[in-house]
Amino acid sequence: MTRQRAPGPGPRTVALHRVDRATGSLFVLALVVAACGASIVGPSSPSGASAGPKVSSPASLSAGVPSNCPGAAVGPAAPTASSAPAGSDRPTPTPPRWPGTTVLAVIALGAADGEIEKAGNDLQAAADAQDLKAMWGAADGLAKMVDALIPDIDRLDLYCGTQAAASIYRKAFPELSAGAKQMRDSITGGNVNGIVAGSQAIAQGLADYAPVRMVIGGLVEQAIVQQRLLVE
């Protein structure tokens, strides 16, 4: 009597066994994803501690803004006329108008900042739990989100005050997209080296993305003011 062979494991099961055997690779992966999570938690850290990559300050980002760009300071929104000091006869200047598509792009990119942070945290948790299915889902979601946002980068170039941020996004987003896709596809194919390489690419993308987190909040505040100007 011929003995029936049990069906072989699927690619994700094979990948899990290979990652379990490749202890060194998994350790590198966990460290890299941990670094990703640390890099997007925020710019502040306890005194004397180093958390994540060094990020640029708003002042250094402002250095990339053309000097002939009116009202293009990187930071909180300029005050509107309604916020002028009480009793002051001097009117507060109205900020220069942005292109409408730039306003929408800044708001979309600002809203996505929290989702990018969540993706890094999800990858961290999945790596800690050695849960390849969760890692696959987090990487796939990150790739799709970033790809959907890439067209907004060109809209930032339409206004000189957001061009410095555009240059950061233009470097970081392709790295995040490529790394997330490499991790996702490598998990499907059971390629341990590809999983590690993908995680390293994500870490680099997040490190290059970190400086814009210092200024996107201020740009969103300005974009909200611009929304009001557009409907006046």
Image (cartoon, rainbow, N blue to C red):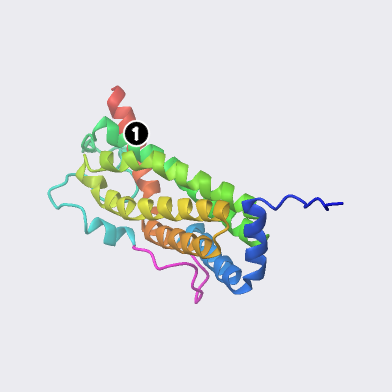
Q: Main secondary structure of the magenta part?
A: loop
Residue located farthest toward the front when viewing the structure as drawn:
1
- From where the camera sits, is residue 82 visible? no
Q: Position of residue 82 (x, y in %)?
A: 32, 33
Position of 222 compared to 15: left or right? left
At x 43% / y 67%, what residue is drawn? 53
Residue matched to label 1: 104
Q: Hey, which quadrant is residue 19 in on the image?
A: bottom right
Callout 1 secondary element: helix
Q: Is residue 209 magenta?
A: no
Residue 26 x, y percent position in the rendering? 60, 68
Q: Would you place residue 35 above or below residue 110 in this image?
A: below
- Looking at the image, which residue is at 38% across and 64% down? 55
- In the rendered structure, the answer to whether residue 139 lies left or right of residue 101 reads right
Left or right of 41? Residue 89 is left
User: What type is the residue that disc 1 sits on?
Assistant: Leu
**Residue 68: x %, y % from top left:** 12, 48
- Viewer can see residue 152: yes
Is 80 placed above or below 13 here?
above
Quadrant hosting residue 78: top left
Q: Which residues are magenta?
A: 44-56
Q: Is residue 48 magenta?
A: yes
